[in-house]
Amino acid sequence: MSLFLESFANCFASLDAASLHRLDDLYSQDVCFQDPLHRLDGLAELRRYFESLYANVQELRYDFHGFDEVDQGHGYLRWTLYFRHPRLAGGKLIAVEGCSHLRWGERVDFHRDYFDAGALLYEHLPAMGGVIAWLKRRLA
């Protein structure tokens, strides 16, 4: 088990709107962050993203399930994101499984999240949710 990854995950999981200053402890100034919906370059851009994220959700938490270090300074975190947004799924709690690929020296300089964007967002939009559910049933 990677002590760096476990420490990173514990600190990341404890972030909230009032503690985003701790991003400086986790990420390098030139961090590259990417997920299925965004690409952000630099700590300032990442901070603005998280400020917006926490301003728009009613609840957000991560449960981490695995800490897999491939080699020194390179590894993966497996997680479940739980969040509640007033305009998604009628404000009900949404759970999304995902994985983060991280590279680090002293701090993380590369963070890429892998998750199903439909399960995170599109399936819970009033107009698109029914269409996506229908498509999934047809493809299954």
Image (cartoon, grey):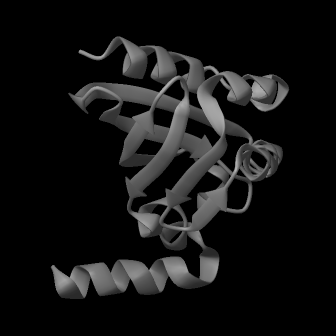
Compared to residue 122, the image places residue 21 above or below, namely above
Please name whichever residue, 135 or 52, is drawn nearer the observer in this view of the structure.
52
Compared to residue 68, the image places residue 117 above or below, namely below
Rendering quarter of residue 26: top right
Q: Is residue 79 left or right of residue 58?
A: left
Q: Quadrant of the N terminus?
A: top left
Percent position of residue 14, x then y: 62, 20
Q: Residue at x 41, y 40 (%)?
A: 102
Q: Residue furthest left?
A: 140
Q: Residue at x 57, y 52 (%)?
A: 32
Compared to residue 70, the image places residue 43 above or below, namely below
Compared to residue 125, the image places residue 139 above or below, namely below
Q: Quadrant of the C terminus?
A: bottom left
Percent position of residue 54, x then y: 76, 42
Percent position of residue 7, x then y: 47, 14
Please name whichever residue, 28 or 116, is drawn nearer the observer in this view of the structure.
28
Q: Residue at x 68, y 36 (%)?
A: 59
Percent position of residue 138, x then y: 22, 88
Label count reads 0
Q: Is residue 3 left or right of residue 61?
A: left
Q: Residue at x 60, y 84 (%)?
A: 127
Please name whichever residue, 22 or 127, is drawn nearer the observer in this view of the structure.
22
Rendering quarter of residue 86: bottom right
